[in-house]
Image (tube, rainbow, N blue to C red):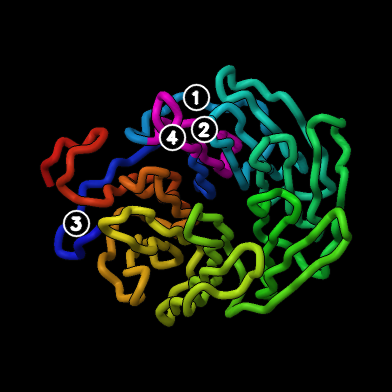
């Protein structure tokens, strides 16, 4: 996704009947990377992270699935759903291994690095932490003054970060029962921890990149053009084409230089609001999902041979 004058051929992953609203990549395993998706049709899926090929569907959710996460080894998948539950799944068998009850719709989930802990954000305004080693009850809870829209563990899992539609970014330290907050540019729609790049925070009005521990900005925020609400963003780790990729209410996948903020490409393909944008761990492609019920894979370098791309534009 490096040249605005060379639109790439995207790969389209189909199979869902309603909006696909979340994507999570594993690390690079012996079999390559994988990614999991969440859909409002209640059918979270696991796919090959290079080709997008369908591997399986996790059966058992009774309502829309709003959020998904996957561990680095592609062994465990977590989901949060409108049936008031968060679940852990065995990625090999597709079976649910743990179920955690929440009081309202679970809009966001995050696995700790060791996969023992699961953080959830629910529409009852509560952020919870569950420990799969001790049972189905939450081990920590924090009631907020607003509805948290997204949640993510800090790298060391001793704190939980969450964003809200009132533009507040919060860091909750369960062990000390303390919360730090700061206000950003608008409703927070997405939090994404990018190894070596910081915490990518997407508000409707701007993209912020902060230090995930101190929460100080690592660079100036990138403003979103008027008339567009951003929903998700990530940093492409490619050393050749370092960029920020984002999407939102205009249905377009945008890339911008991660240093200057200048837009370098704008690709059309989705027919609905883009809900999540994630780059593969090797930086070779970006996966986007939208309200049109599809996932689309975009090559970082159009014309390069990779996966199902043959090297021809």
Q: Which callout, 1 or 4, points to the residue nearer the camera?
A: 4
Of pointers 1 and 2, the one earlier in the residue sequence:
2
Q: Is 259 displayed left or right of 97 in the figure?
A: left
For the residues carrying marks 4 and 2, which lies nearer the camera in this image?
Answer: 4
Determine whether 154 is above or below 74 in the image. below
Question: Which mark lies nearer to you, 3 or 4?
Answer: 4
Q: Look at the numbered disc 2 and give the secondary structure of its residue.
A: strand
**Mark 1 to mark 3: distance in Å?**
30 Å
**Label drawn at residue 236:** none
Mark drawn on residue 7: 3
Farthest left residue in view? 312
Separation of residues labelled 2 and 3 (CA atoms) = 28 Å
The residue range painted magenta reads 26-49
Considering the numbered disc 1 on the image, is that residue within a helix, a strand or a loop?
A: strand
Quarter of the view holding residue 281: top left
**Mark 2 = which residue?**
45
* Disc with the residue nearer the chain's start (3 vs 4): 3
Q: Earlier in the sequence, mark 4 or mark 2?
A: 4
Does residue 284 appear left or right of residue 149 in this picture?
A: left
- Left or right: 108 with respect to 210? right
Label 4, on which residue?
A: 28
Q: Label 1 belongs to which residue?
A: 56
Q: Does dot 3 land on a helix, a strand or a loop?
A: loop
Quadrant (top left, top right, bottom left, bottom right) of the N terminus: bottom left
Residue 32 occupies which quadrant of the picture? top left
């Amino acid at each position: 996704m490096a040249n605005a004058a060379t639109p790439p051929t995207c790969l389209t992953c189909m199979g869902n009947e309603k909006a696909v609203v979340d994507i999570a990549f594993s690390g690079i395993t012996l079999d390559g990377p994988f990614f999991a998706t969440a859909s409002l049709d209640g059918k979270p899926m696991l796919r090959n992270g290079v080709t997008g090929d369908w591997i399986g569907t996790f059966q058992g959710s009774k309502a829309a699935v709003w959020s998904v996460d996957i561990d680095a080894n592609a062994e465990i998948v977590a989901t949060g759903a409108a049936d008031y539950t968060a679940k852990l799944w065995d990625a090999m068998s597709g079976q649910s291994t743990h179920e955690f009850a929440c009081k309202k719709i679970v809009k966001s989930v995050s696995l700790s690095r060791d996969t023992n802990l699961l953080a959830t954000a629910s529409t009852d305004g509560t952020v919870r932490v569950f420990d799969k080693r001790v049972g189905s009850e939450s081990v920590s809870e924090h009631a907020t003054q607003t509805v948290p829209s997204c949640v993510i563990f800090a790298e060391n899992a001793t704190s939980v970060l969450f964003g809200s539609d009132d533009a507040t970014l919060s860091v909750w330290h369960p062990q000390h029962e303390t919360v730090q907050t700061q206000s950003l540019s608008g409703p927070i729609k997405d939090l994404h921890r990018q190894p070596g790049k910081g915490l990518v925070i997407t508000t409707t009005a701007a993209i912020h990149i902060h230090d995930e521990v101190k929460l100080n900005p690592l660079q100036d925020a990138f403003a979103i053009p008027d008339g567009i609400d951003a929903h998700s963003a990530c940093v492409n780790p490619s050393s050749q084409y370092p960029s920020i990729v984002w999407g939102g209410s205009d249905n377009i996948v945008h890339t911008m230089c991660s240093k200057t903020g200048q837009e370098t490409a704008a690709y059309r393909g989705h027919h609905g609001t883009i809900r999540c944008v994630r780059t593969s761990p090797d930086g070779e492609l970006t996966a986007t999902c939208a309200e049109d019920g599809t996932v689309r894979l975009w090559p970082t370098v159009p014309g390069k041979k990779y996966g199902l791309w043959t090297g021809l534009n």
